[in-house]
Amino acid sequence: MQPRLPVGNVPEWLRSSAGDVVLRRPRPEDVAALASHVGTEAGWLSAPEGLLADPVGLLDEYQAGWQGAPNRLGLSLVVADPVTDRLAGMVHLSRLGDDGGLWVSYGIAPELRGRRIAQRALQLVCAWALSSGGYLQVLLDIPVDNAVGQRVAERTGFRRIRRDRIVVKKPTKQRHESWIYARP
Ligand SMILES: CC(C)(COP(=O)(O)OP(=O)(O)OC[C@H]1O[C@@H](n2cnc3c(N)ncnc32)[C@H](O)[C@@H]1OP(=O)(O)O)[C@@H](O)C(=O)NCCC(=O)NCCS
C-alpha cells in the first residue's frame, strides 16, 4: 500500500487562472458520467477489474482516499467541465517514496480527447503542487508505448529522468516498461 497523502494538504477544488479547467473531489453526481463509461474503453478510469461495470463502486473507490482509507489510487480528483461541472476525466495523486515528489496519473474520457484538457489539468496540478502544495517535484510513470501520454507530459514541461522496468503479474510475469518523467 502506498504511503498516504495528507488529505488536508490537497484543496477540495482548483480552477485554472484562465477558467478553462476545474479539478475537484468526486461527488455522488459523478455516477451518471461514470456509468456512461464503465465497461467500454475503461482503462483511463484506472478501475480495478471488479469495478468495471459498477459506477457506484468506482465512485466509492475514488472517494476512499479522501475518507482516509488506504487506497490504491491515492487521492482522486475529477477533471470537470468548468461550465457544466460534468466529469471529463480523472487525476490521481499519490506519494510513493521519500523523494519529495508527488506522483500523478491522469485519464480523459475518449470523446473529449484532443482538446488539451489533459495538458490543462496536469498544468493545474503542477502549479498547485510546486507552490502551495510544497512538493519538490511532480513525477509521472508513463508506459513506453503510450505516445499520447508522453506528449502531454512533454507539452506540460516534464522531462524524462529514467526508464523503469517492473514485472507486474504472476504467473505470466508480464513486463511493464515505462518512462519516468519529472517536473521540478
Ligand atoms: C493521454 C490522455 C490523458 C490524453 O488526453 P487529451 O486530453 O486528449 O490530451 P491533450 O489533448 O491535452 O494532448 C494530447 C497531445 O497528444 C497529441 N497526440 C494525439 N495523438 C497522438 C499520437 N498518436 N501520437 C503522438 N501524439 C499524439 C495531440 O496532438 C496533443 O499534442 P499537441 O497539444 O502538441 O497537439 C488520454 O489519451 C487518455 O486518457 N489516455 C488513457 C490514459 C493514459 O494513457 N494516461 C496517461 C498516462 S498516466
Image: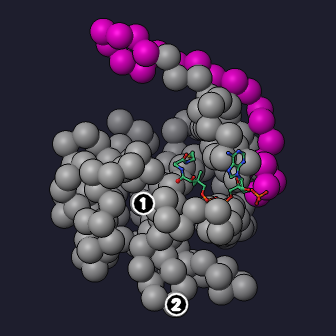
Q: Secondary structure at mark 2?
A: loop
Q: Quadrant of residue 85?
A: bottom left
Percent x, y of residue 144? 65, 29
- Depth check, front residue: 133 or 126: 126
Q: Amino acid at mark 1?
A: Ser
SS of the residue under disc 1 = strand
Image quadrant where residue 78 sits: bottom left
Q: Which residues are magenta?
A: 153-174
Membership of 20 in magenta stretch = no
Q: Which circle marks residue 83 in the picture?
A: 2
Q: Residue at x 42, y 60 (%)?
A: 76
- First reached walking from the N terminus: tag 1 or tag 2: 1
Q: Which residue: 43% across, 42% down?
A: 3
- The residue positioned 58% from the left and 18% from the top of the image is 165
In this rendering, does residue 42 appear at all? yes
Label for residue 76?
1
Q: Which quadrant is the N terminus positioned in?
A: top left
Vertical order, 160 against 154 (above or below): above
Task: Specify whether tag 2 is near ligand 1 (CB below 8 Å).
Answer: no
Q: Is residue 29 left or right of residue 89?
A: left
Give the amino acid at mark 2. Val
- Give neighbour class at mark 2: few <14, some 14-19, many 20+ (Cα, 10 Å): few
- The answer to whether 16 is drawn above or below residue 46 in the figure is below
Residue 8 visible to the viewer: no
User: Is 28 in front, or is 107?
Assistant: 107
Give the alpha-carbon distance from disc 1 to disc 2, as whole Å.
21 Å
Determine if the magenta segment contains residue 163.
Answer: yes
In percent of width and height, residue 39 lies at: 27, 51
Residue 182 occupies quadrant? top right
